[in-house]
Structure formats: structure tokens, C-alpha cells
């Protein structure tokens, strides 16, 4: 280990965040390596090491001959201060080498409020922030992840974006770089060639021209660049790479367990959900493949818990088969099986009884809205009867802890809808009193409300966001009608969600705001102890950018949107149709009941959606 790093470690919290050396990390001989990739997660070690996508791509790139991919995470404030004091540049965990010495610097971005962390990590590494200031082939900076579906706020800083699922495209990116490096290409030559790879968006090849009112007048596409960049998907998940030899962290992380991805996409069409539309179409793994991967992962890692993950796990058709196989194995080996992302409309007594044989944990249902009218508006396809029936099954089976998630500020929401949440919670309490098989422990109902953020590539991408002040008024109204001592109520920070909306729907002018906020001390914005709203407000003022242009203003249906260059497979006319159905309070059936014609099946070569 670098001696300077070793000297600093005793002075900071959780030194294991920065040391590497974990079981199953990949070390290579530098003499055999032609391309070095610094794979950066723009948040702390505990968050990044819980990310399944990062685990997959780390393994994919390290399986390539002559390529070494190493991990980099954002330092906590104490480590950042020590790095500055000792002139220590940001380093990669495996080799302890500074990332400015790497060929490529890749970021995976899953949350908009990590944008300052991206710039800060480049700054700590000693790498120029802006793409235009990085002239050589070395230190090519690229990014992927769900936030890349609106890349414009970071367009001046990232050389190119990889859109969609990365198992195949990551290999093509690095292979082309290997050719470029061996052929002494310039950076411009590499970018021109990488722009020809399906799923790659090179911001410098697109010019945004604005009207005087700040809306986009035109997007000018350079010669050789596609007018639309379509995301990449993996069709055959059974044969796709999946790491069963996962790195075992040396310190506790957020999701400190094995993780099994059962399928991708979602059959539902919740109109607020970006992942539900941008991850289409549905593709699943076979139960026998999943069982083998689960056993291999558990036996190699030594974990005593495994989670079945997806956007809606109870929609996985082979879930009964998989759980029938896994539960005996888990029981024999004292392993807890966690099945999150359950739907209240298909939570079964049979599944509950199976899970009862293992450790009981709390149940979580995302009702999203308190009235049927508003649930129809957002296309939740969930009735009050289904919610209460699921609760009755759970309470009858001995569960005494339920979490209910809602959103405030949804399109067309009224005070009556807000009070409907309190009424639904009251009915859940009555349901427990009637059906609970274990009343000695008492009931805990955890209610949480999030501030609705309109996201790109959803039917609500054009919608207004209410002001933080109005959101807090609705929170206060709801809290005043939650009378039971069994209820615990929490709500999200509204000013953070306001900024999230700006980043999610922002254009290229927002990039300067991010940089200005960083200069004023903004970083680690997703952590309450670091979030500095005044620094952001100062940054908006300094850059002459009005955040309400991206929030309460909303967007016109005929307006050119900053992300219109990006194609996630779901047609814009379909999203508009869904928006109008929302205002008509009409539901759209899920993909299994009837194909709604969103267009995502065209991404499959066989034109078949595995819903």
C-alpha cells in the first residue's frame, strides 16, 4: 500500500473504505495490461459496493485479455480533507495508483444528486473537469447508468455516454480504445469512431440552440453522429455474464448480502416510474439458472442472506419454482431469503407461508396514492381491497410491521387525495385488529411520503413539480390526520427533491450550475449532513439559471426536450397517450394482460417481449 495512504488511514472514519484487499478483488500484472479502466462510483464505498450493476461490469471488463478494471469511490469528508492537506490524488483500490494514470475513467450514475461527486472526484484526481480541456486520448471519461438517459447536465464534462445495459457495450468501448491506443489515434478520432457504436452518445457532436425564453429551438447533429441514440439491452439473460464470485467487502455496506437479479424490465406501467419505462422490455432468467447462481454466490462469499431483486419481484413467473428450490437450501444453511419489491395485488398466502420458514422481516407495500382516483391517474393498477387483503394475509401470518410508501405532489392531486392516505392507514390498523394472530407484540405502521419528481421518458415527463412549500403544507396536513400511536411518519427533504427535478430534466446550462455549486462546497448532496441548499441557490444566481424553468414551469407537449436525442425504446406518442389517459383517470393494463404498444419490443431482434 502507498505509505502516505497508510499514514492517513488511522485518522479517518472507516479506513476499510480506502484500502482494497478484499476477498475476490481482481489483481493483474501491470506488464500484461494494455488498457486500465478506473471504474468510479460517485458515492461512498458502502453505497457503491451494494450496486449490482457495478459488480457485473467490474467482472465483465476484467475477463477481457489485457484489460484491468479497478474500483474507485467518493471519499468521505474527512478523507477528502486529508487528501488535500497531503496533496494525495484520488486512487483506485486494487493498485492504489492515482486514477489520473489510467487510460479510461468510467462512472456509473444512478442518482442525479451525485453529479457534484462526479466533478469532485475528477478534481481530486487532478483530471480537468471539462471534456474540452482534456485533449489527449488518455483519461477518456465516460458514463452510463439510468441518469444517462438525460445526459445533458453533464454534457460538458463527460466525453461520451453508454446508454442502456452494459455487458456487451462495455466490451466494445474498451476494445475500440485498445485499437485507438495501439494505433496512436487522437481523442477526436476515437470519439468519431465510438459514436458509430450503437448506444453511444457523444455530446460534443450535438449542439443545442435556445430560444430567448430558454426553451430549446433546435438540436444540431454533426456529420457522422446519429440523430437518435438508442439504448442497448441484453436479450438472453440466462447466458449473460453474472458474477458468482463477488467481492466480499472488508467493512459493512448498505446491502451486505448476496444479490440475485431475477429479471429486467417491468410489466407495470406506473406513469411516474422512470425505471419502469426506460428498462423495458421484460426479460427474465430461468429458475434453474438463478438457483445455480444463488448457491455458487452464497458458497463462495459466505453470506448468510440473499435477496431476489428486480423492479417487481412478485411478477416473476417462476418465483414459486425458485423459492421452492431455494428455501430448503437456505433453511439447511441458516441463510435468510429476502424477497423485496412485492406487489400488494399478488402477495399470496402461499408465498407468505414459505417465507415464514425463514426469518420474518417487515413487509413493504408501495401504495403511492391514498385514493383510488389518484392510483388510477398514476396507473398503479392497485385497489384498496388488494392492499387490505395483503395486509390481512400478513397479519394473520404473524407479521406486525408494515411499511407503506406514498408520493405527494402527483399530477391532479388534491387535499382529498392527501387525506385519503390517512384514511387508508386507519383501515390498515383496523385490519390488524381484526386479523392479527399475534397481538402481544403490537403493530407498527411506518408511513413515508416522497416528493414527486417528474422524470424523463415517462408519461409525466412534461408535468409541473409543486413547490417545496406546497409539499410541506401537504405533509403537515397528512401528519395532522395520523392519530394512532402505532404510526410513524417520515417525509423526504423537499429541497433535495427540487434539485433532483432540475438535474433530471435539466439541459446543458445546468452543468455550469453543478460546477459552481461544487466551488461553493456542494458534494455528497444525497447525505443529510452534507446537503447545502444555500450553496446551490448561490450557484443558480451566479450562473443566471432559474431552477423553476425545470420544475414548476413544466414542459410543453410540442417543446423540444433536452433528452429528445435519446431513445429508450418507448415511443414519445405512447407517452403522450398515457399522459392523456392519466388526466382521463383511465388505467392501462399491464403487459401480460394486453400489449399497450409502447414500442419497446422493437429492441428485441426476435420482436418478442418476455412478459
Image (cartoon, grey):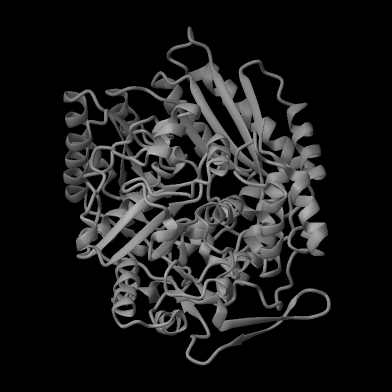
Q: Quadrant of residue 465?
A: bottom right
Instruction: Work out whether 35 lies above or below 606.
Output: above
- Looking at the rendered image, the quarter that the C terminus falls into is bottom left
Drawn side of residue 494 relative to residue 95, left or right: right
Q: Nearer the viewer, residue 343 or 208?
A: 208
Taking the spot 51% from the left edge, 81% from the top edge, the residue there is 228
Q: Quadrant of residue 232?
A: bottom left
- Looking at the rendered image, the quarter that the N terminus falls into is top left
Q: Residue furthest bottom?
A: 223
Q: Residue furthest top?
A: 440
x and y percentages locating residue 162 in the rendered image = 43, 68
x and y percentages locating residue 514 in the rendered image = 67, 58
Drawn side of residue 41 relative to residue 62, left or right: right
Drawn side of residue 541 relative to residue 64, left or right: right
Q: Nearer the viewer, residue 483 or 462?
A: 462
Instruction: Work out whether 115 lies above or below 9.
Output: below
Taking the spot 28% from the left edge, 76% from the top edge, the residue there is 606
Q: Quadrant of residue 265?
A: bottom left
Taking the spot 62% from the left edge, 29% from the top edge, the residue there is 425
Count the labels in the image.
Answer: 0
x and y percentages locating residue 348 in the rendered image = 37, 36
Q: Nearer the viewer, residue 284 or 55?
A: 55
x and y percentages locating residue 581 in the rendered image = 63, 64
Q: Do we see residue 355 in this rendering?
A: yes
Drawn side of residue 480 relative to residue 202, left or right: right
Amino acid at each position: 500500500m502507498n505509505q502516505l495512504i497508510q499514514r492517513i488511514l488511522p485518522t479517518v472514519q472507516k479506513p476499510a473504505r480506502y484500502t482494497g484487499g478484499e476477498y475476490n478483488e481482481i489483481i493483474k500484472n501491470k506488464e500484461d495490461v494494455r488498457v486500465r479502466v478506473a471504474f468510479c462510483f460517485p458515492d461512498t464505498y458502502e453505497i457503491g459496493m451494494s450496486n449490482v450493476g457495478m459488480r457485473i461490469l467490474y467482472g465483465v471488463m476484467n475477463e477481457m485479455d489485457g484489460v484491468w478494471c479497478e474500483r474507485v469511490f467518493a471519499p468521505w469528508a474527512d478523507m477528502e480533507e486529508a487528501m488535500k492537506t497531503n496533496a494525495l490524488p484520488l486512487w483506485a483500490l486494487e493498485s492504489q495508483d492515482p486514477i489520473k494514470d489510467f487510460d479510461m475513467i468510467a462512472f456509473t450514475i444512478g442518482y442525479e444528486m451525485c453529479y457534484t461527486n462526479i466533478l469532485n472526484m475528477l478534481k481530486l484526481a487532478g483530471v480537468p473537469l471539462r471534456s474540452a480541456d482534456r485533449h489527449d486520448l488518455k483519461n477518456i471519461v465516460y458514463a452510463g447508468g439510468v441518469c444517462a438517459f438525460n445526459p445533458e447536465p453533464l454534457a460538458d464534462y463527460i466525453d461520451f455516454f453508454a446508454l442502456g445495459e452494459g455487458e456487451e457495450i462495455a466490451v466494445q468501448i474498451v476494445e475500440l480504445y485498445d485499437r485507438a491506443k495501439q494505433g496512436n489515434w487522437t481523442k477526436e478520432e476515437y470519439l468519431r469512431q465510438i459514436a458509430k457504436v450503437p448506444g453511444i452518445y457523444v455530446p460534443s457532436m450535438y449542439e443545442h440552440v435556445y430560444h430567448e425564453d430558454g426553451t430549446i429551438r433546435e438540436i444540431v447533429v454533426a456529420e457522422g453522429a446519429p440523430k437518435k441514440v438508442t439504448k442497448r439491452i441484453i436479450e438472453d439473460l440466462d447466458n449473460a455474464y453474472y458474477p458468482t464470485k463477488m467481492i466480499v467487502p472488508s467493512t459493512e455496506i448498505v446491502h451486505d448480502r448476496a444479490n440475485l437479479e431475477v429479471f429486467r424490465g417491468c410489466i407495470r406501467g406506473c406513469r411516474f416510474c422512470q425505471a419502469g419505462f426506460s428498462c423495458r422490455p421484460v426479460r427474465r432468467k430461468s429458475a434453474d439458472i438463478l438457483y445455480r447462481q444463488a448457491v455458487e454466490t452464497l458458497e463462495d462469499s459466505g453470506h448468510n442472506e440473499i435477496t431476489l431483486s428486480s423492479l417487481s419481484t412478485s411478477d416473476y413467473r417462476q418465483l414459486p419454482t425458485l423459492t421452492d428450490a431455494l428455501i430448503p437450501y437456505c433453511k439447511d444453511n441458516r441463510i435468510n431469503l429476502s424477497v423485496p419489491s412485492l406487489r400488494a395485488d399478488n402477495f399470496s398466502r402461499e408465498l407468505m407461508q414459505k417465507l415464514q420458514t425463514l426469518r420474518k422481516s417487515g413487509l413493504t407495500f408501495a401504495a403511492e396514492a391514498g385514493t383510488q382516483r389518484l392510483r388510477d391517474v398514476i396507473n398503479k393498477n392497485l385497489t384498496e381491497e388488494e392492499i387490505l387483503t395483503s395486509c390481512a394475509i400478513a397479519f394473520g401470518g404473524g407479521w406486525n410491521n408494515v411499511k407503506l410508501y406514498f408520493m405527494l405532489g402527483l399530477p391532479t392531486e388534491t387535499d382529498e387525495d392527501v387525506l385519503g392516505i390517512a384514511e387508508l392507514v386507519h383501515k390498515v390498523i383496523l385490519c390488524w385488529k381484526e386479523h392479527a394472530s399475534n397481538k402481544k407484540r403490537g403493530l407498527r405502521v411506518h408511513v413515508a411520503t416522497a416528493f414527486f419528481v417528474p422524470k424523463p421518458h415517462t408519461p409525466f415527463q412534461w408535468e409541473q413539480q409543486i413547490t417545496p412549500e406546497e409539499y410541506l403544507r401537504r405533509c403537515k396536513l397528512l401528519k395532522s390526520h395520523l392519530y394512532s400511536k402505532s404510526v410513524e411518519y417520515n417525509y423526504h427533504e423537499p429541497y433535495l427533491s427540487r434539485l433532483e427535478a432540475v438535474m433530471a430534466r435539466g439541459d446543458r446550462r445546468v452543468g455550469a450550475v453543478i460546477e459552481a455549486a461544487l466551488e461553493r462546497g456542494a458534494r455528497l448532496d444525497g447525505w443529510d449532513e452534507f446537503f447545502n441548499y444555500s450553496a446551490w441557490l448561490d450557484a443558480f444566481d451566479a450562473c443566471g439559471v432559474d431552477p423553476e424553468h425545470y420544475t414548476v414551469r413544466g414542459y410543453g407537449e410540442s417543446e423540444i426536450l433536452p433528452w429528445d436525442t435519446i431513445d429508450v425504446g418507448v415511443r414519445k406518442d405512447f407517452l403522450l397517450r398515457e399522459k392523456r389517459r392519466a388526466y382521463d383517470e383511465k388505467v392501462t393494463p399491464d403487459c401480460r394482460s394486453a400489449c399497450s404498444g409502447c414500442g419497446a419490443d422493437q429492441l428485441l431482434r426476435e420482436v418478442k417481449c418476455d412478459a
